[in-house]
Amino acid sequence: MQDNKTPKTISEYDNRDSNAWVFSFTAAMVPFTAFCYGHSKGVTGRVLEKLVKMPGGFYGIFALPFLTLGMEKCIYDTAQCIQGIDPNIRPADRGGFPSGGANLPSFSLCPVQERNVVEDLIKEIDKK
């Protein structure tokens, strides 16, 4: 059974090494890079045209911010869970913007891992 006591600091439940930021950075930058590439190929315009021609019409464009924020939260929560960090736990010393994501339901595509997958991968690479 897991203890649901709120940690006082992030270091109480985050035991990653200093290279763990690479995973979070990659998880955020790959979709952004894909968006930039798609935008350079005209995908953005085609998506907007299709949204306008859908039954919701022009007002369907207003759904875009909510959809993109949901996708961003899904990527962030999944990256945190893979690293063994529960995205629904907010330490007592953190708060305010942008730490409000812990108050929302998790959109993670996988459960919180018991071990730090990134740290284990780095150790495997160092062995070789």
Image (cartoon, rainbow, N blue to C red):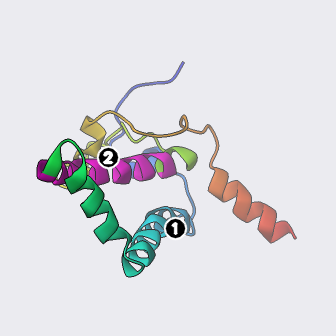
Total marks placed: 2
Seen in the image, is 17 located left or right of residue 65?
right
Q: Which residue is mark 2?
A: 70
Amino acid type of the residue that numbered disc 1 sits on in the rendered structure: Thr
Q: Which residue is mark 1?
A: 26
Seen in the image, is 39 located left or right of residue 54?
right
Q: x and y percent of residue 66 in the render?
A: 23, 48
Q: x and y percent of residue 108 in the render?
A: 46, 40
Closer-to-camera residue (45/13) = 45
Q: Is residue 34 magenta?
A: no
Q: Residue at x 57, y 63 (%)?
A: 17
Q: Determine which of the numbered discs, if any, sits on residue 101 in the image.
A: none
Amino acid type of the residue that numbered disc 2 sits on in the rendered structure: Gly
Q: In the displayed structure, would residue 31 be above or below residue 109?
A: below
- Magenta-tinted stretch: 58-79
Q: In the displayed structure, would residue 72 be above or below residue 105?
A: below
Q: Residue at x 54, y 34 (%)?
A: 111
The part of the image, by quadrant, that contains residue 107 is top left
Seen in the image, is 128 located left or right of residue 94?
right
SS at mark 1? Answer: helix
Q: Residue at x 40, y 25 (%)?
A: 4
| Residue 94 visible within the image | no
Q: Main secondary structure of the magenta part?
A: helix
Closer-to-camera residue (73/15) = 73
